[in-house]
Amino acid sequence: MDWLEPSPGDHIADIGSGTGLFLSRLVEVASPEAPILCVDPSQPMLDLIPDDPRLTPICATAEQIATGEVPMPVETVDAFVFKEAIHHVKDIPGTLSAMADRLNPGGRILIVSLPPRLDYPLFKAALDRFAEGQPEPDDMVKAMRSAGLTADNAIEEFTVTIDREQWLSLVGNQWMSVLSTFSQEEIAAGLEEIRDRYPESPITYRDRFAFVRGIKD
Ligand SMILES: C[S@@+](CC[C@H](N)C(=O)[O-])C[C@H]1O[C@@H](n2cnc3c(N)ncnc32)[C@H](O)[C@@H]1O
């Protein structure tokens, strides 16, 4: 909310909204006249968005919205938000550039993304594979600037404390998409590695998020 500074009446598109889990604060500034556009290519995720006139689900990818292949109910918006979704976009510079053209003056693109190197208590192979697929914040800043936006960024840190068994169960259930790329045998070996490395409960670790913001003059 601090990075986005939304005002009532702003037209905001949440790209890769998923189930809308993180929209409870943002929805307070929305209205039926200016609903948050919840954009996601997964219809099963969109089906879980609360039935609220301030939320409009749109089944599309970021790229389809950027190019206009799937139209939004408004031509231009005041903000595009990506929360843990930008890594799914194949051509980030091209998509951000096309989105910048769909911003109102003063509009912004806010990307909230995990940095490539995580401090999560995962097994090493998962940390390495995650890093391979995750864009660097500096590259996203460059892409914002190439799109003609004034860009800034920072890393925000949050301490997470979690019961060890709960953490092991999350990893065992492959809760992060990178974990779903490992076989059941690899997950079992990974769980052993985590048990060895983190014998105590609860487990405490640093969660870090990159915030990258581009503003249209
Ligand atoms: C990790 S979830 C984040 C969901 C939500 N923003 C949150 O923070 O709870 C990533 C979401 O991106 C969506 N996604 C996948 N490919 C996408 C694309 N090309 N454009 C936009 N969203 C995409 C997925 O369907 C998924 O819902």
Image (spheres, helix red, strand yellow):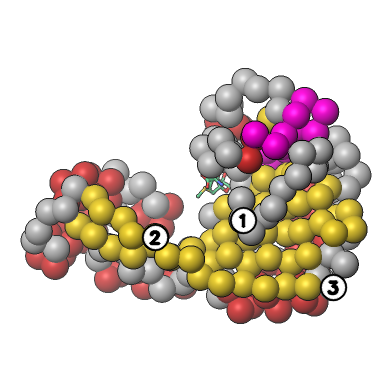
Classify residue 95 by image quadrant: bottom right
- Note whether residue 48 is visible: yes
Q: Is residue 84 left or right of residue 147?
A: left
N-term mark: 1 or 3: 1
Classify residue 87 by image quadrant: bottom right
Classify residue 51 by image quadrant: top right
Disc 1 versus disc 3: nearer the observer: 1
Give, as a three-letter code, the residue at label 1.
Asp
Q: Which residue is mark 3?
A: 148
Give, as a three-letter code, the residue at label 2.
Phe
Q: Which residue is mark 1?
A: 2
N-term mark: 2 or 3: 3
Q: Are the residues tagged 1 and 3 within 8 Å (C-beta)?
A: no
Q: Quadrant of the C terminus?
A: bottom right
Query: Is residue 30 located in the magenta-colored stretch of the structure?
Result: yes
How crowded pointer 1 is (Cα within 10 Å; few <14, some 14-19, many 20+) is rated as few
Disc 2 versus disc 1: nearer the observer: 1
Q: Secondary structure at mark 3?
A: loop
Measure how far apart labels 2 and 1 are at the Cα level: 15 Å
Measure how far apart labels 2 and 3 are at the Cα level: 31 Å
